[in-house]
Amino acid sequence: MIVQNLRLDIWSDIACPWCYVGKRHLEAALAQFEHAAEVDIVWRAFELDPSAPRVRAADGQSYAERIAKKYGTGTAQAEEMIARMTKTAAADGLEFRFDIIRPGNTFDAHRLLHLALERGVQGELKERMLRAYMTEGQAIGEPDVLVPLAREVGLDDLEVRAVLDSDRYAREVRADENLARELGISGVPFFVLGGKLAVSGAQPADMLLAALQKAWSDLQAAPLVFAEGAVCGPNGCD
Amino acid sequence: MIVQNLRLDIWSDIACPWCYVGKRHLEAALAQFEHAAEVDIVWRAFELDPSAPRVRAADGQSYAERIAKKYGTGTAQAEEMIARMTKTAAADGLEFRFDIIRPGNTFDAHRLLHLALERGVQGELKERMLRAYMTEGQAIGEPDVLVPLAREVGLDDLEVRAVLDSDRYAREVRADENLARELGISGVPFFVLGGKLAVSGAQPADMLLAALQKAWSDLQAAPLVFAEGAVCGPNGCD
């Protein structure tokens, strides 16, 4: 039954290659989805590395070397993984620049995404942040980086600064992360359609489209009658 | 999964005794429902008598006589039905005044309820209209009756007049009625919880509470995993 739009909650991070790829696949799916205009997207916070410093200090290591060290793989293996990811992203029109990437903490970015949700520009800010991080080598944990990005999507500098200088939206970010834990989400992106159907990971557009169609048809199903009592109808009242 | 409030759509009319009783039962159920603050109610249009004139001309007949004539029952039987309904309503604190009731067309009232929905005072206007019709003997089809009722709940006179003098919200009222037809709704009140669970008629508060609890628990259920793909997690990306 169409009483409301289809709600689509997406848990993801900024510092997250597959999240950006997943976003492109979703956009491709929505471009083919008849009811795209009736889908309400909410981007939910997920930090892959909550303990990361605001901006990682330069240590002379390449991204592959850091990855290799962190996960205990060889550098060659890490480089191969990065190359594969870069190639996959390129096929979706994305330029991943692991050579200039500047890892950092994304908590403040997620707080601004909550501000952007209230101001109706969350999708725009999410896109801008992903590009800044994955393509432009911008230090997404830095207030001085975040303010101009937010300005670009129409947010007010003073308001953005006020959020960054306070703990506004910290509670909302934690709530997203708590909900992710409750749902058992261990990796992102993670899509939840209509609160009922989950797609984990950067699925191909066709799969996301199939999920959208299934969720839409679920939404249209007639409601189950729970109980019946006294009514008034065209022929009088019971 | 709690990603959004519980949506409660209620199809009902103004000229509808059981709709007013059902509203009281719902209020009693909500008073006992832990998550009442997270329920979003939308009142949907349903006309029991779409062909009714704006205001029925005085014809010297009592309500019981009109009912008896319309449905082909005896006047005594109609009077008994009215007495029973009046008594039931009184038990819920409602005063039904069938002796002064002024039947009429409710299409314009429903249009104003859509305006009130946009202005955040739909529940208030619905209540005010039901009282005007069922208790105060006001001619709910008359613009000069509707304007002051709308004013009482905070709507702007000029805006209300502009709606009444145009066909604004006619499409929304028809859409509600079309949806009712699609759902096979033949009598009101008709409650739809979370788009998924239906309660037909003026059920006791306990039954409505049980339906609210069931719908709430459905809303909290973990989503079904439709598909799994490449993700980034705390230990790196696939």
Image (cartoon, coloured by chain):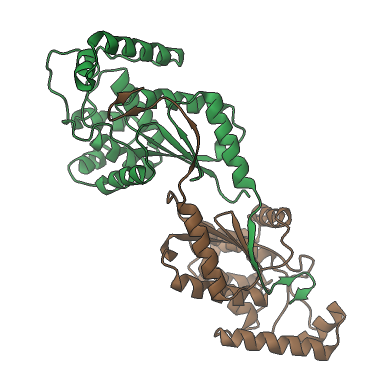
Chain colours: A brown, B green
Q: Nearer the viewer, residue A91 or A222?
A: A222
Q: Residue at x 38, y 24 (%)?
A: B18
**Is residue A98 visible in this depiction of the protein?**
no
Q: How many marks?
A: 0
Q: Which image quadrant is residue A142 in?
A: bottom right
Residue A208 x, y percent position in the rendering: 55, 69
**Is residue B2 visible in this depiction of the protein?**
yes
Q: Residue at x 44, y 65 (%)?
A: A36
With respect to residue A188, does A6 lie above or below?
A: above
Q: Quadrant of the C terminus of chain A?
A: top left
With respect to residue B81, does B213 lie above or below?
A: below
In the rendered structure, the answer to whether residue B235 lies left or right of residue A97 reads: right
Q: Nearer the viewer, residue A66 or B141?
A: B141
With respect to residue A192, does B72 lie above or below?
A: above
Q: Nearer the viewer, residue A153 or A64?
A: A64
Q: Residue furthest top?
A: B76
Residue B199 x, y percent position in the rendering: 47, 34
Q: Which of A83 and A64 is in front in this view?
A: A83
Residue B136 x, y percent position in the rendering: 29, 17
With respect to residue A44, does B135 lie above or below?
A: above
In the rendered structure, the answer to whether residue A130 lies left or right of residue B22 reads: right
Residue B188 x, y percent position in the rendering: 37, 31
Q: Which residue is drawn at 80% across and 72% down?
A: B235
Q: Which image quadrant is residue B107 in?
A: top left
Q: Which image quadrant is residue A16 in?
A: bottom right
